[in-house]
Amino acid sequence: MKLTEEQKSILEGSKGETLAKVMESLVRYGELFGADEMVPVSSKYNHLVTSFGLKALGPVYELMDKLIEAGAPSGQKFTVDPKPLDKNVPSNFAQDVVFKLFMYSRQRDYEEQLRQLGLLSDSSFTCTCYMDEVGNKPGYGDVLSWAESSAIVYANSVLGARCNRNSGIIDLMGSVIGYVPRFGLLTDEGRKADWIVEIWTEKKPEAQLLGSAIGMKVMEDVPYVRGLDKWIGNELDDEACTYLKDFGAATASNGAVGLYHVEGLTPEAVRYGEDLIKPDAKVYVIDDAELERVYREYPVIWKNKDASPKLCFMGCPHMSLQQLKDWTDKVEAGLAKSGEKKVVVPTVFTAAPGVLEEFAKTPYAERLKATGVITSYICPLMYMNNPLSEKMPVITSSNKLRTYTSARYYTDDEILDQITKGGK
């Protein structure tokens, strides 16, 4: 890999042994993927994926301490993925013991390390850092050092920034040193589409389901999606961005997609059109029958497949402000139709702290609270990693949560029926 004189000097120890090791780690990481050079990280803020103080992550805490001792904080302030615990989310005594003593026993100490290294604020824990209420929205062409898959695919696709699917800690290292290796999605060639995806559905496809189908088909490749404009238009307004947030998270978790293009909508597709498509691109046609096939083939790993749900999580990735408002209307309408006063399944809507603060200022907050729905900043995935939570029959409309945990996927309409009607 070609290094600049400054990069070579850091590698040789001009800024101390710790930063030399950070640079060496990034160089080795880049060489594994055929990187030709290191390029500057240009975004205003970074985003880290490791938000959880797992007892087992001893080497992470040692690394953090070494960076702090060396006076090598992140070159950027950063946001970080959601916290794993919230006392407002339903859990029993046994679950709490496992959470606090055996899983996230280092949470408080780890959060203090994050503060010392450059945490933007104590409200910066979210997987949707790019929302206006959070303030970490990269610009077109910005080079990032992120690792959270749902945030990377959104930044690459909807914002036109550039970031590879890095691992945890590599994201921090890139920010500390100010450079990342150039390969993959940081290159023009790496951003071209390997697949053309044709949408032929007769109704608006569920974002999480459509993303799942594409992710499982193309895996780590780049898809160019045609026909979605019929359902979400050609403007990146709040509704379209919210749809693409959930769609992208499913492509990234059910496959390994780090970038997609939507014809006539996403910035690079608007700018370059079909020039983004490789000459040998494969074609995948998605109609209603294909989406139904994908849905029916999801495994149900509950011990009792007919169990009544004990908990519902919505918001993986975190919900937008408009989603919270829309779902308040939906839940109220569902309860009015069923004759129930409150949700019949304990239900948690998760969103960024900043989004929840803005939501609390609206009349919707009290209306949603009256339905029995709980709002939280928690990471549902981290909650479900508890082996006692894993045994619970939990439902969700998040394909990311379905993929990584025992939670069972249902469409939005089915979720609404379950939490407002139950067995009626």
Image (tube, rainbow, N blue to C red):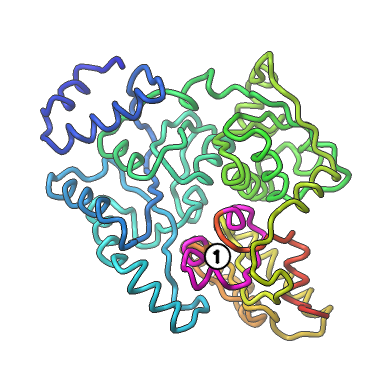
In this rendering, the count of numbered labels is 1
Q: What's the residue at 51%, 70% (across, down)?
A: 376
Image quadrant where one finds the N terminus: top left
Magenta residue check for 383: yes
Decide which of 290, 351 is in the foreground and name it: 290
| Image location (x, y in percent) of residue 229 | 77, 37
Magenta stretch bounds: 381-403
Badge 1, how many Cα within 10 Å: few under 14, some, many 20+?
A: many
The answer to whether residue 49 is left or right of residue 345 is left
> Residue 288's image quarter?
top right
Above/below status of 137 relative to 188: below
Question: In the picture, residue 269 is in which quadrant?
Answer: top right
Place residue 237 in its image quadrant: top right
Q: Could you tell me residue 293's position as x and y percent?
A: 80, 47
Q: Tag 1, which secondary structure?
A: strand
**Toward the viewer: 162 or 147?**
147
Amino acid at pointer 1: Thr
- Check the image and report above or below for 83 versus 264: below
Is residue 158 left or right of 78 when viewed as pictured? right
In magenta stretch: residue 4: no
Q: Residue at x 69, y 15 (%)?
A: 280
Between residues 166 and 78, which one lies in front from this camera angle? Answer: 166
**Residue identifier under label 1:** 350
Q: Is residue 409 left or right of residue 406?
A: right
